[in-house]
C-alpha cells in the first residue's frame, strides 16, 4: 500500500456481507494491494450497496453470495458497476455456484475462509487487465464534480461542499451546508482532523454524524488506513462486545472460528462507534480500559492485543442525561468527550434545506433519468417550512421518492408528499389523539374489544417504519425512541399473534 501502481486515482473497494465484521475483515484486503486505496466501503444490506454502486465510483466489488436471495441476484449489482472487478465469495463453495456467479457477472470466486493474500492476488490479476475508469463527474466522491461547481444547465444545482481547504481531497466536499452552524462544523473538523484525540459527535438521527466522522478520517494522516464503522444500535446488545473486540474459537457456543473485531481492523486508522449509548455498562468499562491502555483482550483469550486506532464516537442521545440516569459511565464520557462536535437538527439550519434538496435532486434525477432541474417557489417554501424529524436522511428519501414518482422540469408543491405539505394532518383525516382523549367516554367497552398494549405499539411502530420505507433510524427518530428499542420490540413480537 502507499504506491499508486501507476494509477491516476485511488482504487475504491466495496464489500457486501450480511456480517459487518466479516465485511470489515474482507475490506482489509486494501492493505494488501499495491495501489493507493480509498477507505473501503462496507455494507450489510443490499439496498445501500446498490444505491452507492449507482451513484459512486467502484473499482472492486466483493459480494458474499449468502447475503443475496439467490446466486444470480449478483446480476443486479454487476449491471450497476459494469467496469468494476467483481469477486463473489461464499462459505458454501461448489463448482456450480462458482459458474452461476460468473454467469451473473463475477470475475472470480473464492470459498470462505480465504486469506487476504489470495483475495488480493485475484483482485490485482483482474485490475491489471483493465484501466482504471476516470472519475465520474456525477460521483459525489469525485473531486472534479465538486471542483467544477454547478452543472451548467441550472443555477439551482450550485450547492457545493463546505470548508476552507482544498476539498477535492477531503470528505468535507460531501458535507453540504451553507448555514453558519455547518460552516463552524467544517472549521472544527479541519482543526480536529490532525489530532489523535477522541471525537465525540452528538446530534439527532440523520443529521450527518457518520458523514462528519468520515470527513475527519479523510482529512487526517490516517486517511489511507481503514475507517471502520460499528453501529451499536444495529447489533443485539450481547453481540456488541464480540463485534468490537473479536473472539477466539471456543469463546462461547457457536464460536467455531477466531474472529477479528472492529478495533483490530481499525489498527492504524479510525474506529467509528455509532450509537455508543447502546453499550451496556460492562462493555463501557472494557472500552474505557482500551482507551486508557491501547490494549484489549478478545473474548475467550487472555493475550492482550495492542491496537492504534483513533476513536470517534457518536450518539443521538443526550450524554449528560444518560450519565444522570446511570446508563453511561461518567469516566468514559470524559475520556471520549475530548473533541466534541454537535450537529444541529435540520430544522435549526433551514438555509441548508434547499442546497441539500438540490444536491439530492441532481443525484436522483440523474439516476432515474428524469429532467428535473430545480424546485418552484411554493415547493421551496414548503420544504423549508417543514420540521424534518428524520433530518437530512428524511429529506434525501423524500426527494428520491418525489423523483421516482414524478417527471418534469421543476418540482412543484403538489408533488411533495402529504406529510410534508400538511404536517398537521388536518386534510388527511388524521385524528388528533390528544383531542380525542379529552372527549367524554360514551360507554364502557367490553374487555376483549381493547387492543393489547403490545399490539398498539406494534401498529404504531410498523406505521412509522412504513412511512420511512423501513428505515429504522428514521422511524425511531420520528417516534422519539432509540433504534434499539425498535429492534428489541420486534424481537419480543416474534411468536405472538396479532
Ligand atoms: N451535510 C450533509 N451533506 C450531504 N449529505 C448529508 C449531510 N448530512 C447528512 N447527509 C446524508 O444523510 C444521510 C444520513 O447521514 P448520516 O448517516 O451521516 O447521519 P447520522 O447522524 O449518522 O444518522 P444515525 O444517527 O441514524 O446513524 C446520509 O445519506 C448522508 O449522506
Image: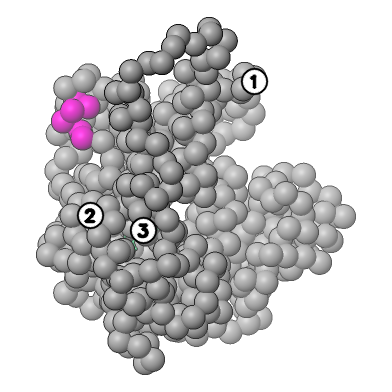
Disc 1 secondary structure class: loop
- Chief secondary structure of the magenta portion: helix
Q: Where is residue 398 in the image (x, y as percent from the top left)?
A: 43, 60
Say whether disc 1 or disc 2 marks the residue closer to the N-terminus.
2
Query: What's drawn in magenta, residue-wise?
Result: 318-323
> Residue placed farthest to the right in the image?
96
Q: In this view, does 89 lie to the left or right of 378?
A: right
Distance of label 1 from label 2 (alpha carbons): 39 Å
Query: Mark 1 sits on what residue?
Result: 497
Mark 3 and mark 1 in contact (Cβ < 8 Å)?
no
Q: Tag on residue 347? A: 2
Say whether disc 3 or disc 2 marks the residue closer to the N-terminus.
2
278 and 257: which is toward the camera: 278
Residue under the point 16% across and 47% down: 340
Decide: is 168 above or below 388: below
Q: Quadrant of the N terminus?
A: bottom left
Disc 3 secondary structure class: helix
Q: Where is residue 307 in the image (x, y as percent from the top left)?
A: 35, 42
Say whether disc 1 or disc 3 marks the residue closer to the N-terminus.
3
Residue under the point 34% across and 70% down: 379
Counting the numbered discs, the total is 3
Residue 325 position by quadrant:
top left
Mark 2 and mark 3 in contact (Cβ < 8 Å)?
no
Amino acid at each position: 500500500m502507499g504506491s499508486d501502481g501507476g494509477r491516476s486515482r485511488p482504487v475504491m473497494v466495496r464489500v457486501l456481507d450480511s456480517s459487518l465484521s466479516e465485511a470489515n475483515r474482507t475490506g482489509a484486503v486494501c492493505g494488501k494491494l499495491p495501489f493507493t486505496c480509498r477507505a473501503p466501503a462496507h455494507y450489510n444490506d443490499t439496498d445501500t450497496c446498490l444505491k452507492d454502486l449507482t451513484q459512486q465510483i467502484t473499482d472492486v466489488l466483493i459480494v458474499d453470495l449468502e447475503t443475496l436471495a439467490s446466486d444470480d441476484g449478483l446480476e443486479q449489482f454487476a449491471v450497476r458497476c459494469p467496469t468494476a472487478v467483481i469477486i463473489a465469495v461464499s462459505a458454501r463453495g461448489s463448482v456450480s455456484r462458482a459458474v452461476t456467479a460468473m454467469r451473473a457477472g463475477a470475475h472470480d470466486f473464492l470459498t470462505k475462509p480465504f486469506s487476504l493474500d489470495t483475495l488480493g492476488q485475484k483482485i490485482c490479476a483482474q485490475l491489471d487487465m483493465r484501466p482504471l475508469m476516470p472519475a465520474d463527474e456525477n460521483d459525489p466522491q469525485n473531486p472534479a464534480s465538486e471542483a467544477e461547481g454547478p452543472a451548467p444547465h441550472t443555477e439551482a444545482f450550485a450547492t457545493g461542499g463546505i470548508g476552507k481547504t482544498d476539498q477535492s481531497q477531503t470528505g468535507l466536499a460531501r458535507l453540504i451546508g451553507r448555514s453558519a452552524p455547518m460552516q463552524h462544523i467544517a472549521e472544527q473538523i479541519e482543526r480536529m482532523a490532525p489530532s489523535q484525540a477522541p471525537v465525540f459527535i452528538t446530534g439527532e438521527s440523520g443529521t450527518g454524524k457518520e458523514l462528519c466522522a468520515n470527513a475527519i478520517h479523510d482529512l487526517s494522516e490516517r486517511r489511507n488506513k481503514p475507517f471502520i464503522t460499528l453501529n451499536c444500535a444495529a447489533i443485539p446488545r450481547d453481540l456488541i462486545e464480540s463485534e468490537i473486540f473479536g473472539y477466539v474459537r471456543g469463546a462461547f457456543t457457536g464460536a467455531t472460528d477466531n474472529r477479528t473485531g472492529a478495533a483490530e481492523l481499525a489498527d492504524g486508522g479510525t474506529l467509528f462507534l455509532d450509537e455508543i449509548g447502546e453499550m451496556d455498562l460492562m462493555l463501557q468499562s472494557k472500552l474505557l480500559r482500551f482507551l486508557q491502555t491501547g490494549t484489549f483482550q478478545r473474548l475467550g483469550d487472555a493475550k492482550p492485543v495492542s491496537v492504534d486506532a483513533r476513536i470517534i464516537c457518536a450518539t443521538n442521545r443526550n450524554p449528560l442525561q444518560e450519565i444522570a440516569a446511570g446508563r453511561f459511565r461518567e469516566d468514559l464520557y470524559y475520556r471520549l468527550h475530548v473533541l466534541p462536535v454537535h450537529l444541529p437538527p435540520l430544522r435549526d439550519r433551514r438555509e441548508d434545506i434547499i442546497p441539500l434538496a438540490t444536491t439530492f435532486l441532481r443525484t436522483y434525477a440523474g439516476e432515474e433519468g428524469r429532467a428535473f432541474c430545480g424546485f418552484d417557489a411554493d415547493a421551496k417554501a414548503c420544504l423549508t417550512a417543514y420540521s424534518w424529524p428524520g433530518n437530512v436522511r428524511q429529506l434525501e428519501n423524500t426527494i428520491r421518492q418525489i423523483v421516482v414518482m414524478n417527471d418534469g422540469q421543476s418540482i412543484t408543491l403538489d408533488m411533495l408528499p402529504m406529510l410534508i405539505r400538511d404536517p398537521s394532518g388536518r386534510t388527511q383525516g388524521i385524528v388528533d389523539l390528544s383531542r380525542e382523549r379529552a372527549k367524554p367516554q360514551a360507554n364502557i367497552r367490553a374487555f376483549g374489544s381493547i387492543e393489547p398494549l403490545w399490539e398498539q405499539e406494534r401498529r404504531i411502530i410498523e406505521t412509522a417504519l412504513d412511512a420511512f420505507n423501513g428505515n429504522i433510524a428514521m422511524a425511531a427518530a420520528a417516534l422519539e425512541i432509540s433504534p434499539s428499542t425498535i429492534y428489541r420490540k420486534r424481537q419480543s413480537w416474534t411468536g405472538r399473534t396479532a
